[in-house]
Amino acid sequence: MDYYFWFALKSVPLVGNVTFCRLLHHFETPEQVFKASAEELAAVPGLSAAAAAQIRTHDYREGADRECASLHRTGVRIVDFLSEEYPKILMEIPDFPPFLYVRGALRSAETSIAVVGSRRASSSGQSITERLARDLALRGITVVSGMARGIDTAAHRGALKGGGRTIGVLGSGIDVIYPPENRKLFEEVAGQGAVVSEFPLGTAPLAENFPRRNRIISGLSRGVLVIEAVANSGSLITARYALEQGREVFAVPGNINFPGSRGPNQLIKEGAVLAESVDDILENLPHHGVPPAAESPAAPSFSLTPQEASIYTLVANSPLHADEITVKCGLTAGEVSAMLLRLELKGAVTRLPGNYFMIS
């Protein structure tokens, strides 16, 4: 698939992730967005006049050409949100990226736990992290982290030692390995799971990228485990994202005299689950009792059209009545009914009594 116009639309000022998906719902393809007249753009619900003007005037050609050439040169793949490979759990967050740059293999559905913490972790913290990540992997849980120094590195290594899958989420372009000493780990994670980024190729690991990266770490996961984090750290930002996204938060308690214990201990005070073992985590997941990896059933996968994706994201957080879906997505009752039937047949949604629908 040629992603030229996907790159082009993503580069337009004032077109963020939510607006991107809204435009795709309305026009079906990014190329059609650029062919739209001013009147057609004005008819898109929620699209500001300023954003519509940027779509019509922004010169995207050089950037889109460069991105396509870089993609070909690096061998990186694009997985868009309409693909059967795109993690459907990520579509539950409000501003999920319309596409991801990927090395390795993603799965439409898998049980994942994010493991995050200090870059300046103690040797004890790294040892605990590696043990917990290994035990999660042995129980068939995918470990998600940020490929940073300290706790993140220990989390990925533990999952690899447990023979399980692990996903690294970058705060840079996927072709920019940071920190540089993790080059070998990067290759191992890509070989036994995936490395992903929402940032264009060549993007430097700038400080402002990491909070955005953190929302994807939590968005890919059913829960977030925090191990060693100082107050106001990036790990606590990830925990806050997790709460906003309806994920569970876990924390490993620590010595009150150690600065790295302040973050996890504060989270426990605020209601996070105290985690001393993998059982503490699995018992508090919405669907616990995950079997060993060898016994795990195959994860369902399905592709979506832009309009099906709009309906899927509507029911991702809570069940909705078919009439509510019709009102929210701006389609006719007949169109919504037909798409709900297709989503049922794909195994994407389940019909509940009373004509309510929820994701499967």
Image (cartoon, helix red, strand yellow):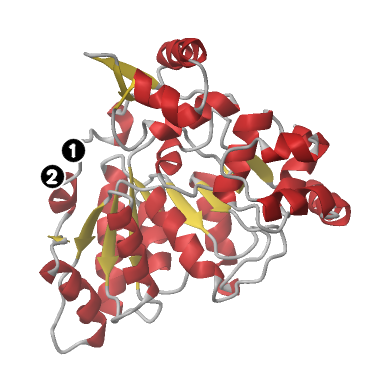
Mark 1 residue crowding within 10 angstroms, few (<14) / some (14–19) / many (20+): few
Which residue is at a point 43% across and 15% down the rendered structure image? Answer: 340
x then y, percent, for residue 315: 36, 30
Find out whether the residues at labels 1 and 2 contact each other: C-beta distance under 8 Å.
Answer: yes
Closer to us: 43 or 311: 43
* Residue 174 vertical placement versus 39 (above, below): below
| Amino acid carrying mark 2 in the image | Glu
**Is residue 2 at least partly visible in the picture?**
no
Could you say which quadrant of the image residue 266 lies in?
A: bottom left
Which residue has dot 2 on it? 283
Could you say which quadrant of the image residue 181 lies in?
A: bottom right
* Residue 76 vertical placement versus 125 (above, below): above
x then y, percent, for residue 358: 31, 25
Which residue is at a point 30% across and 63% down the rendered structure image? Answer: 239
Mark 2 residue crowding within 10 angstroms, few (<14) / some (14–19) / many (20+): few
CA separation in Å, label 1 and label 2? 6 Å
| Quarter containing the C terminus | top left
| Drawn side of residue 39 relative to residue 198, left or right | right
Closer to us: 99 or 288: 99
Which residue is at a point 68% across and 30% down the rendered structure image? Answer: 27
| Drawn side of residue 133 relative to residue 274, left or right | right
Numbered label attached to residue 288:
1
| Amino acid carrying mark 1 in the image | His
